[in-house]
Amino acid sequence: MFLKDEVALNYLAGAILLTFPWLGVVLGTWGFIWGVLMLLAVFLVALRRGLSIAVLSLLIGYVAPLIVFGVTVFNTVSLVPLAGLLVVLGWQKHWPVRVTFFWSAALAAVIGTIPTLSFMVQGLSELTASEMTNTTIQQYQASGLLEVMQQQGITEVQVRELLQQGIHLYALVLPSFAALVALVEFGFVFYFVRIWFNKDEGRIPFTHWRLPWYSVWGAVLGIVFYLLGDQFSWPILHVAGINIMVVYGALTLVLGISVFVYFLQSPRIPRFLKLALIIAGFIYLLFSIISLIMFGLFDLVFNFRRLPEEA
């Protein structure tokens, strides 16, 4: 007796939830694709077999390696698939699409930073930074890039100083990078699953992408954390504020591009003006990026496109 493709897919999704966290740790294969497969499995099991079954399967899948390897397992395993449960709950409760996506994406971003927390607590030692700098300098020497820099008047000492500054900056914003990877992973699966299951009429055009108006308070919170941490020398708030602002900068950049493309499609704007705006955007790229970020941020409050909030 052969199983139908749909039934076989349901069993495969359940097996992924039960085994992939363990296999990801043992084999060291956890990565972007691993997380995407886990998220897809969460949606399949929750939508076809029930949310409680998906929760139980995930609980078993994550608890097993936790018992064997201890809390250090979270340095490797991502909890982003848990955000899929909130999405399914939102669909069952008939939440608006933007509300469902915003809170689920926020959860994905927060728990996506968990693997970086141990590194942030320990900090980047001077020895590690020095070793990373020496390794990079050796690579530059082997490729001939260091010689080219020296011909341009840049000494090896200056290169080392720039590399050390870059390494420390990277260590500072590492949680925001992890959060952005989690957002890309979650957003890709969310978009695909909505089309697959035709949830809320499936695909939303890029020019209509928008978050709920109250999501702007996340950016405000990031600015407040940064200022308070800087004013009172509270490093935790200072670092948290910087990382929140980096994440919101990326999000509002996407939203700003969405608004910009929306208005470029307007028949009221002459074609030569559209072309001029696009060319100017590439010429003054940095200014354009900052403008799009601000445009996307203020669109959360003013809704320049007059899109209905409940959509």
Image (cartoon, rainbow, N blue to C red):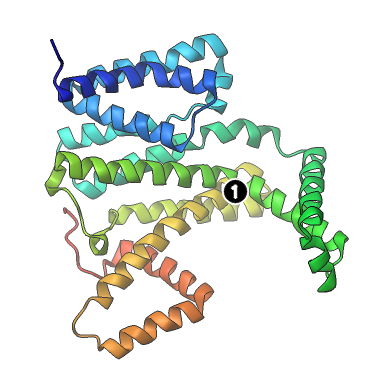
* Left or right placement of residue 16 versus residue 77 in this view: left
* Left or right placement of residue 77 versus residue 45 in this view: right
SS state under label 1: loop
- The x, y position of residue 101, in whole percent, is 28, 45
- Quarter the N terminus occupies: top left
Between 300 and 78, the one nearer to me in the picture: 78
Residue 234 showing in the rendered view:
no
Mark 1 is on which residue type? Answer: Val
- The x, y position of residue 299, in whole percent, is 32, 66
Between 103 and 147, the one nearer to me in the picture: 147
* Mark 1 surroundings within 10 Å by alpha-carbon count, few (fewer than 14), some (14 through 19), many (20 or more): some
Task: State whether residue 19 is above or below residue 237.
Answer: above
| Residue at x-position 23% and y-position 33% | 88
Task: State whether residue 23 is above or below residue 164.
Answer: above
- The x, y position of residue 190, in whole percent, is 28, 42
| Residue at x-position 51% and y-position 55% | 245
Residue under label 1 = 173
| Residue at x-position 21% and y-position 20% | 8
| Residue at x-position 32% and y-position 53% | 214
- The x, y position of residue 32, in whole percent, is 45, 38
Task: State whether residue 203 is above or below residue 77.
Answer: below
- Which quarter of the figure has residue 192? top left
